[in-house]
Amino acid sequence: FTAQRGLAMSIPSGPSGPKPPPMGPPQGPSPKRGPAHQPSPVRKVAVLGGGAFGTAMANHLANKGITVQLWAREEEVVQSINEKHENSIYLAGIPLSQKIIASSNVADAVNGAEQVYLIIPTPFIEKWLVEYQSHLPWWVPLVCCSKGIEKESLRTPYEILVDELPGKYHAKLAVVSGPSFAKEIGVGLPTSVTCAAHDSEVAKQVQVTLATRNFRVYTATDVIGAELCGALKNVLAIACGASDGFGFGANARAALITRGLAEMTRLVVKKGGKASTITGLAGVGDLVLTCSSNLSRNYSVGHAMASNAVPEHKRSQDESAKNFNKDLAVAEGVKTSLAVHLLAEKLGVEMPICASVYEVIHKGIDIKTALKKLQDRPLRDEHDEYQGTWVWSAL
């Protein structure tokens, strides 16, 4: 990942030249809130990240009448959005609102934004912040939509932001998670997500900005729970895709999803999150979606690995092999499986399904052998009381 800094626009000096835009928070009294302390309507936002999900979120916000300034590192993405009103690289075939203005200059993208949505792949967030943190406004909500766990530090995106940003940013941080395929958001299909923030007022501001009849937003305060669920579901989706690829049937997939919820709960609670988060959109909602649809890259990778639809000797020769290798490279669960394994080891949490995915991808264990190993585990009771909350025990 190589961040590309755009060229800042020079501003003439002197009495005849235009004044530079304000670089600090708005001056003067705060705007009055409406009935029941509803946040004021947002007119301009920045979306930092020009991938499929960033583009879909930008289009959703623009279709609400909000001006969206979208930053993308690839000039071809910027050109495609501004000239064709389509992200032909990452979200081809979906027409985009003309209220989206794309730029490769972060300073231009965040200028005047009343909310900032950060949608950068998790492995690159720290490096991106080192490059561009000075441009980020600290006085508006900074909403992270990235999912995953950084394998070097075992931090979630929110934890990276807290560690790397000065303290003045922390009060305005929030995360968005839940069952939300980019393609479906992009075309306006019904979607529901959770916005979690330690400050409930920040979560409500984001809720009001994002919400429409077809895009429901719920608020929560369990940031770590929402983020861990968003990371773990990608690993579990690989296991479900593999099970379906072997033709093990719906019963097996349902068992993997249910027992996957048990693993999610144990890790979330161990990290200080709430078990109740697992029952919500960020937990079971996102898990069911990702573990049962071909739109999920993680599910598709597991399915292809198991069904052997692309034989080893053909993977560098035909188009389907290229697609498989591309999915393998970009599927979040591939890298996250290593981070989850290390985090579970560090915290002493038993996660047999996630461990099996790790062994297949990073240790070369035969995938069918790994799935059978799960079935051969000793029989036991289903439920245990874990840290004061009834959750499922290990398989």
Image: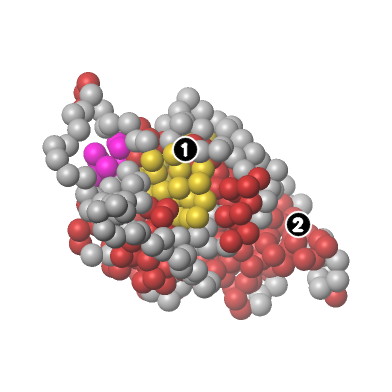
Q: CA distance from mark 2 to mark 1?
A: 40 Å
Q: Quick check: can you spot residue 359?
A: yes
Q: Residue at x 55, y 44 (%)?
A: 56
Name the residue that disc number 1 marks.
Answer: 61
The residue that disc 2 covers is: 246
Is any atom of residue 259 visible in this view?
no
Q: Nearer the viewer, residue 387 or 316?
A: 316
> Of all residues shown, which one is farthest toward the left?
29
The answer to which of 123 and 240 lies nearer the viewer is 123
Give the secondary structure at mark 1.
Answer: helix
Q: Residues within 10 Å of mark 1 (few under 14, many from 20)?
A: many
Furthest residue toward front: 16
**Residue furthest bottom in the image:** 363
Asked if disc 2 and disc 1 are in contact, CB closer than 8 Å, the reply is no
State the SS at label 2.
loop
Depth check: give the residue in front, 265 or 313: 313
